[in-house]
Amino acid sequence: MQITSDFLILGSGIAGLSFALKAADHGTVAIITKREVTESATNYAQGGIASVFSQEDTFDAHVNDTLVAGAGICHEDVVRMVVEEGPQTIKSLIEWGVKFTTSGDAYDLTREGGHSQRRILHSDDVTGREIERALVTAARNHPNITIYEHHIAIDLITEAKITRKRLNPNRCLGAYVLSIETEKIITCTAKITLLATGGAGKVYLYTCNPDVATGDGVAMAYRGGANIANMEFMQFHPTTLYHPNAKSFLISEAVRGEGAILRRRDGTAFMEKYHHLKDLAPRDIVARAIDNEMKTYGDDCAYLDITHKDPDYVRTRFPNIYQTCLDYGLDMTREPLPVVPAAHYLCGGVAVDANAETNIRHLYAIGEVAFTGLHGANRLASNSLLEAAVYAGRAYTHAIGELSNGNFEFPPVPEWDSGTATNSDEMVVVSQNWDEIRRFMWNYVGIVRSNKRLERALRRIRLIQEEIEDYYWDFNITSDLIELRNIATVAELIVLCAKQRKESRGLHYNIDYPERDDVHWKKDTYVRKQF
């Protein structure tokens, strides 16, 4: 089976849908998504989207806050571009039907950690769900967009792979895709391919990411020869609900933005000794502080306390968080919430230029899958949705130019060859390796690292990858096997980048190099597959 389109988009969050809605006016669009179209990290984003929308705020202030959070290695030209294009980009979201919360005649702007001003537009405390609703509705109503739910990309199709030649630059021709429901592998060819596959939180044992966040785009791009950068910078969200029945429910940073205080079990507030912004410190500092307090005092968690605020205000400002916690028997207006850090956001990814294009021609990457240089060593809260939307516009403009100027004659693209592969009756191999990777990544390559831990992790990954490769070619491909292969690849990339960086900066903390080194390491780390 074959699907041919002008634009092939892998992923259905804000990045993929924003690009799709623009590109659909210039050609046919195929959107590939692993689960239902709404199942994306965007859909779970609570806090909001950062942009300069008040008279008290300035572009310079937003730029500076981003640079400070990024711990010295943000690309300042990228930061300024994203910040300055932000307001117009958000107006496009509003035109597509996104409804942000207002206060009187103006948008209700809130504040989160690391921000010097109130500049977070939100839709109550379910901003991502509102963005996803509006964009999905618009996409479903566009005649040029076809959405393929329950389909998962296996690998990119590149010209070098098809012709078995070393090409520089290489060119992307599409992707091989598995229909999860029919178990058939589809050859998807396109003039333009976009990776919008989101993050990789499922590489870790504890994460607030949805189950789809298995690093697929990064892994596929790496196998295809794309440059990968700064994978050591995995952001751990400081405040995920600690409850046996809660599946890593995130407590938005906006709760601290509205005055919540982090405390130990005995009620002692502790953030003052870690940072002058106390509970509004950047996420890397807050996550390490909670981790340190838990280890020092033997506590299982920390406590987020907003009981000093008016209960009606809390219920009105955070209706989803309040109700969800209440469902677990926790009333945040009366008692502090138990919280722990969890893997949240990948600041590195597939390296792209200012137009979101990778070093493989006609392959673009937007959103959490991409490394743009915006986030540096630590993402400033609510900059991620902004980055995705801004780069969707830039990728669209560049891709349309490529369509008008480019030569899109493809070599013959063969169908997927399953060879002598058979159905497996040993799926325990997949689940065992999946669990092992996530556990040692949490223990060895988590919030705090060391040289020995990184070496141990790399040895384990290499052994598991050998098992996966043997299994991969012997048995018919399933979505579970694809995701296992991808998290193993992403785990390796995180370790390789972490081993390169001989310092501690932002989200990467190595006890063997506890100081920041601006002389030697005020730069990015890169990895590229050698063929």
Image (tube, helix red, strand yellow):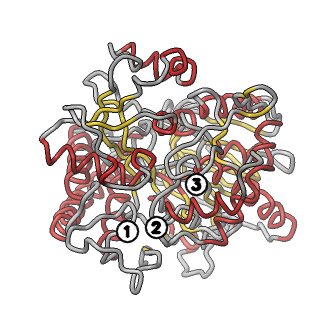
- Disc nearer the start of the sequence (2/3): 2
Q: Is residue 230 above or below residue 266?
A: below
- Tell which tag, 2 or 3, sits nearer the viewer: 2
Horizontally, residue 435 falls left or right of residue 284, namely left
Residue 357 seen in the current view: yes
Q: Residue at x 51, y 21 (%)?
A: 314
Q: Quadrant of residue 122?
A: top right
Quadrant of the rendered image containing residue 190: bottom right
Q: Look at the numbered discs 2 and 1 and tell me whether their residues touch, using CB distance below 8 Å.
A: yes
Neighbour tally class for label 1: few under 14, some 14-19, many 20 plus, Cα within 10 Å: many
Q: Quadrant of residue 404?
A: bottom right
Cα–Cα span, label 2 and label 3:
36 Å
Residue located beneath label 3 in the image: 175
Query: Which residue lies under the disc numbered 1?
Result: 505
Q: Which mark is residue 71?
A: 2
Decide: marks 3, 1 in contact (CB < 8 A)?
no
Quadrant (top left/top right/bottom left/bottom right) for the N terminus: top right
Mark 3 vs 1, N-terminal side: 3
Residue 99: percent from left, percent from top: 74, 29
Q: How far is disc 2 from disc 1 in space, using C-alphas?
A: 7 Å
Dot 2 or dot 1: first in sequence order is 2
Residue, x 37% and y 16% (percent of image)?
331
- Secondary structure of residue under mark 2: loop
Number of numbered discs: 3
**Amino acid type of the residue that numbered disc 3 sits on in the rendered structure:** Ala
Name the residue type under label 2: Ala
